[in-house]
Amino acid sequence: MDFLIKFAQVHETFRLPEIEALAIVEGLDLKVLHYSLDSPFCIVRLPSVDAAKRLVQRSILAQSIHELWGTGKTLQEVHDAVKQGTPHLWAQYKMVSFKFAVEPYQGSRSTAKRIELINSFRFLGFDGPIKMSKPEEVFTIFEEWPFDSVPKGIPDPTNIHFGRYLAGSSRDMCLKFDLKKRGYISTTSMDSELALITANIALAAPGKLFYDPFVGTGSFPIACAHFGALSWGSDIDGRSIRGEGGKKSLQGNFEQYGLGTGLGDVFSADLTHTPIQRRRWWDGIVCDPPYGVREGLRVLGCRDPERTPWLIEAGRTKGSDPDYVPPKKPYSFLAMLDDILVFASETLVDNGRLSFWMPTANDEEQEIPVPSHPCLEIVVVCIQVFNKWSRRLITYRRVPDAHVSPLELQAYTARKTTGVSGTTADELNPFRRGYFKKFEADD
């Protein structure tokens, strides 16, 4: 059966990956027949109406899904498709309450023209009452118009679809988890919409364990817990986890949404010195590592041990004290990306996913390449574009060991550590350096 998904016209490169991920979560056989970044309409093939409803029930970027009755370049082509493919369905809706709607994308229709379009489907023979509020069935005429069709006076749309409404999505969850309504946030808290999308693409679901090594105020664990996963997290700065305590803390955020049972635990730790055993137990790892712009990228250690031997000695003698604050030093962003991939390769279950955000300049000469690892296969790269820079959501799948090339793994292990020489934040982080220079080319 063919169905039409109506997407929100935002985050276009994220929409199809989210739907494909949800098909995996629901165990559905999904085939995408037509999709374009320039259109909110996507035509897919699924085994049943029930499968269609399940596909979009937790989607953030889809708005609704419709049973597709006909599609064409002209209204007559749509009429012909409906008459040819759906007469066996008409009797089911002959006496139910219904309404028709017209949705022109990038176009405009007068009230008179809308009524004319609706009346053109009188051949369906529906005799039930017309209800504009809460009808049993809704039939929609979707139109795709060229860009700027209204000021250019373009008379007709380029594509027309006709379908029966089946189900809505979870897009309203963006409002429920809106940061403006959250009790505890920081300058680096991830937008609720993007956190929920990330959790979907990473396949968060009941019975799964998810981990965020840069947990902050908990945006990603909250999103994963909402979808049923048990969430864990850590952060080098324990203050961001604890906040002021009570409602003004990470745990307070979970309790605000009634997700207390979805929080496994959080703890203060540095990913490069993590206490987590290297065992394959995480179903998913989601994170937004610090870029070194709003928050500096630091790890445990001394910037110059030879000049500060007392810090080394303090670590030996007071390291186990509860009030001991270990020293931190700037760290290479590129090295941190490698650390994330190595950690994921050692702790993700087979086919578990790693989804993390990574910034890059839009200028090809300053672009940061997508990191790779022999044990991790890139599933998708989604891009959120700003002015002179972008950030990517990169998602990997943990390849089963039997499918990992021993030679590639050996070469990766023997390579030189990725990084940038230097000791200051600007020297160690090319993105930070480019950001504050407004990504202007070096002379």
Image (tube, rainbow, N blue to C red):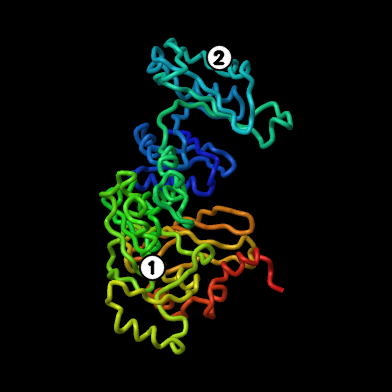
Percent position of residue 193, x then y: 46, 46
The picture places residue 122, in percent across and down from the top left corner, at: 52, 13
222 with respect to 384 (left or right): left
- Which amino acid does the dot numbered 2 rest on? Asn
Alpha carbon separation for disc pair 2 and 1: 64 Å
Residue that appears at 34% across and 33% down: 50
Give the residue at mark 1. Answer: 236
When the figure is inspected, residue 282 is found, relative to residue 182, above or below; the finding is: below
Name the residue that disc number 2 marks: 119
Q: Residue drawn at (27%, 77%), measured in percent from left and top?
A: 320
Q: Secondary structure at mark 1?
A: loop
Residue 92 x, y percent position in the rendering: 38, 18
* Lower sequence index among marks 2 and 1: 2
Front-lying residue, 164 or 195: 195
Q: Is residue 216 above or below residue 441?
A: above
Q: Residue at x 45, y 15 (%)?
A: 131
Q: Amino acid at mark 1?
A: Ile
Q: In what element is the residue under mark 2? A: helix
* Quadrant assignment for the N terminus: top left
How far from the left and from the top, in percent, is residue 247? 34, 50
Of residues 4 and 442, the one drawn nearer to the viewer in this rendering: 442
**Residue count near mark 2 (Cα–Cα under 10 Å), binned few <14, some 14–19, many ≥20:** few
Q: Which of the numbered marks, if any, corresponds to residue 339?
A: none
